Amino acid sequence: MQRIGVFVCHCGTNIAATVDVKAVAEALGHEPGVVISQDYQYMCSESGQNLVKNAIKEHNLTGVVICSCSPRMHENTFRKAAAAAGLNPYLVEIANIREQCSWIHKDIATASEKAIILGRAAIAKVHLNAPLIAGESPVAKRALVIGGGIAGIQTALDIAEAGFDVDIVEKQPTIGGKMAQIDKTFPTLDCAACILTPKMVEASQNEKIHIHSFSEVTDVKGFVGNFTVTIKKKARFVDETKCTGCGLCTEKCPMKKVPNEFNMGLDNRTAVYIPFAQAVPKVATIDPNYCMMLKNGKCGVCSKVCSVGAIDYKQQDRFIEEKYGAIVVATGFNPIKLDKYDEFAYNQSPDVVTSLELERLMNAAGPNGGTLLRPSDKTHPHKIVFVQCVGSRCDDSKGKPYCSKICCMYTAKHAMLIREKYPDTEVYVFYIDVRTPGKNFDEFYRRAVEQYNVHYIKGMVGKVTPKSDGKLAVQASDLLSNEQLHIDADMVVLAAAIEPDKTARPLATMLTTQMDTNDFFTEAHPKLRPVESATAGIFLSGACQGPKDIPETVAQASAAAAKAIGLLCKNSITCNPCVAHSNELMCNGCSSCEKVCPYGAITYIDKEFRMPDRTTAIRRVASVNPAVCQGCGACTVACPSGAMDLNGFSNSQIMAEVDAICK
Amino acid sequence: MQEAIINKAKQLLADGTVDRVIGWKRGEFAYDITPAVFGSAEEIDADFVYDDFTSANVSKYLVKETKKEGKVLVFLKPCDTYSLNQLTKEHRVDREKVYVVGIPGGPKLDIEKIKAKGISGILSVKNENYTLKIETIYGEETMPFSEAILDKCASCKSKKHVVYDELIGEDGEVLESNRFDMVEQLENMTAEERYNFWREQLSKCIRCNACRNVCPACTCEKCVFDNPESGVENKAASDSFEENMFHIIRAFHVAGRCTDCGECSRVCPQNIPLHLLNRKFIKDINSLYGEYQAGEDTTSRAPLTDYTFDDCEASIVHERGVE
């Protein structure tokens, strides 16, 4: 005979304001098997838990139902309380009467009725609960960082510092990411390369850090502590172990007309290339789209000049497989494409550039050696118009609904740097708002306005028209003085919105992590778990989680590292005992479950069975490896015969819940 | 054709290629053609039948027959070969123990359509140049062959054998079929009209289980509707709505695995167009995940038990479901 205890939590007024908790406790007390039903103000408090513990002992309870908040909040609390009182923790069920009831209803009568129904479902389920015992699984003492920008580098350095091996997978030929392309950094105006490249070198020299550049993650299997990841090392047609980065091949390569992506296509590179001087690893890469040798077998110059014989035109993509305990996603961002913004003439005039292109135009390693010249005629610009929020805070489908966060500050930086270096240049900035929260940020912006006399104009640019004399006619409105402005500018700089890297979406699927509608990775809790994903063992670092500047990115990168280190420190983690198992007598051996299992936990065995007519038969049946199964339940719904079942969420338990709700 | 099939069966039995033959024999009436297993040339000579009423898909019998010793010969029409492939893919049939002879497909005749003309007391039906000469106890009747063909043959999807060891006659091609026309009509109904349509149709069900028992996708060791542990076995009997759910649940269970052989509707004594439920799933799978024909091969992964990065998002599937 079941002896079930029901405990209804007020959660202060969170529940009690919309649910008549006394009536719920009273009603559930009459359900079959319930021997005690109580309400209490804060069930999760020490005294609330004691109420549960005492009831378990006093009434010799065989099952406990807590009507409270989401199980994601306090299921563990009550499981531990039950265990402390000698009851198997898996005999505790939570009825979520807060998130799924009191918070979404206004009418007390309706909410109370629903709370009773939810409680009844949990009671029906707990009747069928079986005690479960959790096992343990070991933790692979190695972390994977996906993305080698400043976020990934910082995370890797911190994890390595704690003594664990870290692999960085970077899809580009070098680590460094977007920060390597930036000229100066706000609010201190120090050179990005000067502070980034020491970190890149540190990462490459740290013996705990292993950099897989020009590589991609192609497959992820397993679960927290035990991920198995396949990494594709793309063919770069250069033997990394031999190449010394001398650069002779890049000098001699006859194919010199390849758009240089590091300089945003503003100049050209050769088909065999090293992205920039401080690249890590400093190894050449051959671009198969342009290399004459790879395209039609005619050339071979680089191979002839290479003194160490590093060139290998026959190199193939290689796949390596490695085990990781933790994975940190640091896939970063890109500026959006501006094809849809014809009003700014981005596609019509080379003198309309994005802010990232301006970074390269002003950088000493950029196309003009650091002198700011108009891309069209290489003359010095005397009037520059900056347009803020191009694609940010957009309510149409062209742009993004969110604020890209970094544009106000880098535009102030650009304006200030130009005024500093070229005092004869007039700079206009058109803005919706200037957003400068952050340490020393507003002071920085005010310096641009007050000391450097940058013309900040509240209003949007409506149209940019290239004129025959090479100028750009800028039409804009000044919202404060309510007048139309016409500026003949030499250059227009667009602060393009930033968006998460597009390649992150298939990655999110592989990692079974969630993304929001803008393809930013979703954190487990927006306030309390900002660097963890909802999938255990997957952490988030940098702009892949949301727009961030460098200081924030670095802070979050270290936070993600701390979380990963916390996991890697453990020798083993407690497994979830809610795993699947197959009823062999009912199993058809059809392989449906094996196909949907994301963890590869299901195999098939040929087993001898005694049949009803006293014969024996060999049947193919499914077998679940409980150490690998994560209890997702995909197999139980794929199984046509219902042979596959899940501990703690059995088919009959779920049917009992549905029946209780529909009663 | 019957003679060629019988000769082939006897030859393969005689030379030891096979130990048994799955074919058909006559039931109580001339038009009742029933699957049967034959163990010898004598049995074949006595009972083996292949005619215009021989429409039963015998591939499902291989589930049991391949568990026995020895090799079994099976004659499969093009539509039946899809079922065999699907069963092979699901490891329900041991392909090694089967010798498949592909035979030409229909169109086959539907006795209900003949009876619907008011013709009763039927003794035999003969096809003479696509005119049916029907001998009854009341005298001879005639009707055009084309008016008596099975619905499933009228919307035939393929004349191609997707698996065989040898063929009698020529192999055909996959056809452009009109099989989704009725599904489209249903889709164009309002939700209420559609609900009423299915309530009316499904309420005719007498739960004889013929559809389930004939279905080559329904080969579970133990059907959930027979299994007390499933918690649903008595539900269908509890009220008339739950009763209707039997067919919906069954359609879900075979979704992505149903080859659209049409046997469910053919055997239904109440003439419920059950195949429309399955075709709706097939049509939706095709439009959401790309063209897929269950049983076309034995290796591809079915869309519902597979995931690719190109799969449409759940929200798109959801949007389509909202009316």
Image (spheres, coloured by chain):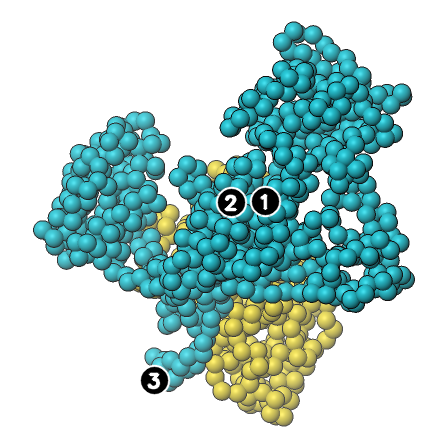
Chain colours: A cyan, B yellow
| Quadrant of the image containing the C terminus of chain A | top left
Separation of residues labelled 3 and 1 (CA atoms)? 69 Å
Separation of residues labelled 3 and 2 (CA atoms)? 65 Å
Give the chain letter at badge 2. A
Q: Amino acid at mark 2?
A: Ala
Point out residue A291 in the picture as x, y percentages from the top left corner: 83, 56
Q: Nearer the viewer, residue A279 or A495?
A: A279
Label 3 crowd (10 A; few <14 / some 14-19 / many >=20): few
Q: Are marks 1 and 2 in contact (CB under 8 Å)?
A: yes
Label 1 crowd (10 A; few <14 / some 14-19 / many >=20): many
Q: Give the foreground label among 3 and 1.
A: 1
Q: Amino acid at mark 3?
A: Arg
Same subunit, tags 1 and 2: yes
Q: Nearer the viewer, residue A568 or A25?
A: A568
Image quarter of residue B83: bottom right
Kindly identify which residue carries mark 2. A557
Kindly identify which residue carries mark 3. A614
Q: Nearer the viewer, residue A616 or B118?
A: A616
Point out residue A30 in the picture as x, y percentages from the top left corner: 15, 43
In the figure, is residue A392 to the left or right of A309? left
Kindly identify which residue carries mark 1. A150
Label 3: which secondary element? loop
Q: Give the foreground label among 3 and 2.
A: 2
